[in-house]
Image (cartoon, grey):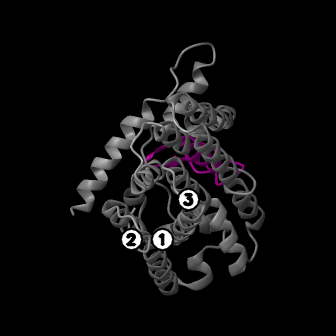
Amino acid sequence: MDIKAEIGRHTDEAEQIITSYLPEEKGYQKTVIEAMNYSFLAGGKRLRPILMLETYRLFGGKSKVIEPFMAAIEMIHTYSLVHDDLPAMDNDQYRRGKLTTHAKYGHAMGVLAGDGLLNYAFETAMTAFDCGEDVERVAKALKILGRKAGIYGMIGGQVVDVQSTGKAVDQETLDFIYELKTGALLEASMMVGAVLAGATEEEVAVIEQIASDVGLAFQIRDDILDETSTLETLGKPIHSDERNEKTTYVTLKGLEQATKDVEEISARGLKRLAELPYENEFLTELIKALVYREK
């Protein structure tokens, strides 16, 4: 398999689906919609909607009920980046080689664009009820999406991350931050795909563990790239964690051990995936590519 070409093809497929759900830029409030769409269209791997779709396919899903959820998860991810870049948080001026939303539209509109994306994500996801599919599955998927994005998921991780800035952080706390801040939305992506395709509760629990491993390995790899990459390659400022006085896997355990941990954790997740009685070769290769990426 030419994984680079396949990722490109699947990214294009996801892009076409998720952008079809963006709001029209009109009305008195069109400035915030422009800022929302600017943020959403600024590029990115579209990792979460791709993982969602491929997990859905892994369990035999074939309908369009997955599509509004694909758009919703990317809107939630995008809003989190918009708010993460704000002066009160990381105060970054560039992301993916472009001005961040607050740098282009102003601080207030940056806040509102993030708020708008989060709310519109759930408006979008709820259109899945109109697809004529099992409403219980849709409701369960919404519940997962809400919890993994909220105070018991991504926001909870953000809270501890902010509170830990400038302080020494131990391994347990750092794992908590990564599990929630990065891992929660990846877990939501794969769990929603499994649920909508009719996976059993036991299978959904296994998928949650796989996604948790992928999320942790992905974030550690992000820490490594923050230390070793360049602005041109990464598309965002490097050494931002150091500048913001944040403990990372690299500062806590060193570059060599962090690299070993990525290999061990990703291998654990891939083993769990291989043990499922289903197969999706692209999903397996995608996970490998993500945890060993260069940007």
User: Which residues make up the magenta segment?
Assistant: 75-100
Reply above or below: 199 against 287: above
- The single residue placed furthest to the top in the displayed view is 27
Q: Are marks 1 and 2 in contact (CB under 8 Å)?
A: yes
User: In the image, residue 126 lies at what x, y percent?
Assistant: 60, 33
Kind of residue at badge 3:
Thr
Pick the quarter of the image with the C terminus.
Answer: bottom left
Disc 2: which residue: 292
Residue at position x 40%, y 57% in the image: 58
Instruction: Give the CA distance from mark 3 to mark 1.
Output: 31 Å
Mark 1: which secondary structure? helix
- Give whichever of discs 1 and 2 has the lower sequence position: 1
**Observer-nearest residue: 84 or 40?**
40
Q: Is residue 78 visible?
A: yes
Disc 1: which residue: 221
Neighbourhood count class around disc 2 (C-alpha, 10 Å): few under 14, some 14–19, many 20 upward: some
Residue at position x 55%, y 59% in the image: 200
Disc 3: which residue: 200
Q: Is residue 111 magenta?
A: no
